[in-house]
Amino acid sequence: IVVIDPNEDALERAAECGVAVLQGDASRDDMLNAAHVDRAVALLVSAGRDDSAILIVLTARKLAPDLKISVTIRVADNEDIAHQAGADTVVNPVSFAGLLLASSLEGPDRAEYLADLATSEGKVMLRERVVTPGDVGCSPDEICSGQAVRVIRNGKPHGPRDPAFNRLQPGDRILEIIDSA
């Protein structure tokens, strides 16, 4: 893990966690090259500003065309732009917080469960995995240790009531909720 940030205090906190740090601007080729972005497994972008985040995504995509890139975007209008810039995953923490708040109106336990699911210290977790050759032809219930909630096939989600959910195919991905307590 390499953290790139212009803020020295942020880098000190990151270094205390045992990660490598680089002080500078992550939207610059030289910074991403110094972090060996071309050999990275993934890039997480949380720049604090949408314009900066999108520029980092564009720069990283130029240097590492096959890199898995996830980015936080705060303004909903910028989510499509982040995808167009090359982000594989766009997370809007403002929208997510709004969903939690709205869920609390349906009952405090619902919002608490969603918050628990979203934290690494929670009692439940959402796991995503690729279907193995041995899983092909099975149903998610036959192979999952948790509760399967989605099968992703060719980029399209299928829920338990969808007939496509019941027979796994090569290339499918499964989302399941697992009790981690």
Image (tube, rainbow, N blue to C red):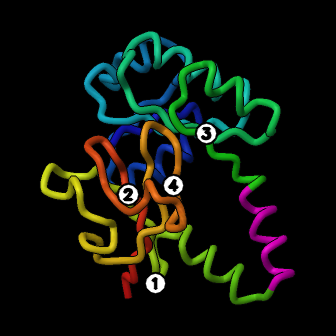
Q: Tag on residue 123?
A: 1
First-in-chain label (4 vs 3) = 3
Disc 2 crowd, CA 10 A, few/some/many (<14, 14-19, 20+): many
Q: Tag on residue 143?
A: none
Find residue 33 and report its horizontal and vertical position in percent. 36, 16
Q: CA distance from mark 1 to mark 4?
A: 25 Å
Please say whether residue 49 is one of the residues in the magenta stretch.
Answer: no
Q: Which residue is mark 4?
A: 158
The C terminus lies in quadrant = bottom left
Q: Is residue 96 visible?
A: yes
First-in-chain label (2 vs 4) = 4
Q: Nearer the viewer, mark 2 or mark 1?
A: 2
Q: Which residue is mark 3?
A: 90
* Relative vertical location of residue 104 with respect to residue 167 in this rendering, above or below: below
Q: Which residue is mark 2?
A: 174
Closer to the camera, 52 or 58? Answer: 58
First-in-chain label (3 vs 1) = 3
Please tell me which residue is depicted at 71% across the width and 33% down the height of the picture: 79
Looking at the rendering, the stretch of residues picked out in magenta corresponds to 96-106
Q: Nearer the viewer, mark 2 or mark 4?
A: 4
Give the overall secondary structure of the magenta segment. Answer: helix
Please tell me which residue is depicted at 41% across the width and 76% down the height of the picture: 147
Q: Nearer the viewer, mark 1 or mark 4?
A: 4
